[in-house]
Image: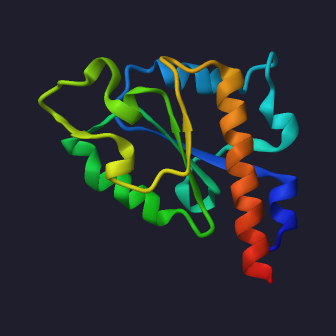
Amino acid sequence: MSLNSFKRALWLYHINAGSCNGCDIEILATLTPRYDVERFGIVLVGSPRHADVLAVTGPVPRQMVSRLKRVYEQIPDPKVVLQVGSCGMEGGVFHESYNLVGPVDQIIPVDVYVPGCPPRPEAIIEGVVKAWVKLEKAAEQRIT
């Protein structure tokens, strides 16, 4: 994979680990004409095998642990995990739920955190830009 591939497009796969859908709505808001991240080459894809970034929303309940790990393993290297929303960081409103295994970073490694309940589209875009920078650095290291 060449360094130039990240300068053209960044493909993002979104998985809802168990959120209330507030973060999901905000992720979709970034694709609307008001924010229009597709003009920068940021596109949601339907398969983790085609993604550069895994965007995870929500805390992780027991049923999602194996699924989240499987999706993470399917994304080709180099990859970045973007945690969107406060629920995936500390549990948020689901903090003391009997069914939660824990935050996302206890299941898979997280590279970029986007706090908020739900985070604003501007914050999500900033998180994606940080992920983009990490991918460019990883690609440069692979080339040299």
User: Where does the image place residue 83, in percent across and percent down from the top left?
Assistant: 50, 39
Q: Nearer the viewer, residue 20 or 91?
A: 91
The x, y position of residue 14, in whole percent, is 53, 41
Image-based side of 133 in relation to 45, left or right: right
Q: Is residue 140 above or below residue 104?
A: below
Tell me: residue 9, above or below residue 93. Answer: below
Q: Can you say which quadrant of the picture contains the N terminus?
A: bottom right
Q: In this orientation, does residue 48 appear?
A: yes
Residue occupying image coordinates x 11% and y 29%: 98
- Which one is in front, 113 or 54? 113
Residue shown at 17% from the left, 25% from the top: 97
Residue drawn at point x = 28 percent, y = 45 percent: 64
Within the image, what quadrant is residue 55 found in? top right
Residue 82, located in which quarter of the rendered image? top right
Q: Residue at x 60, y 70 (%)?
A: 77
88 relative to 116 in the view: left or right:
left
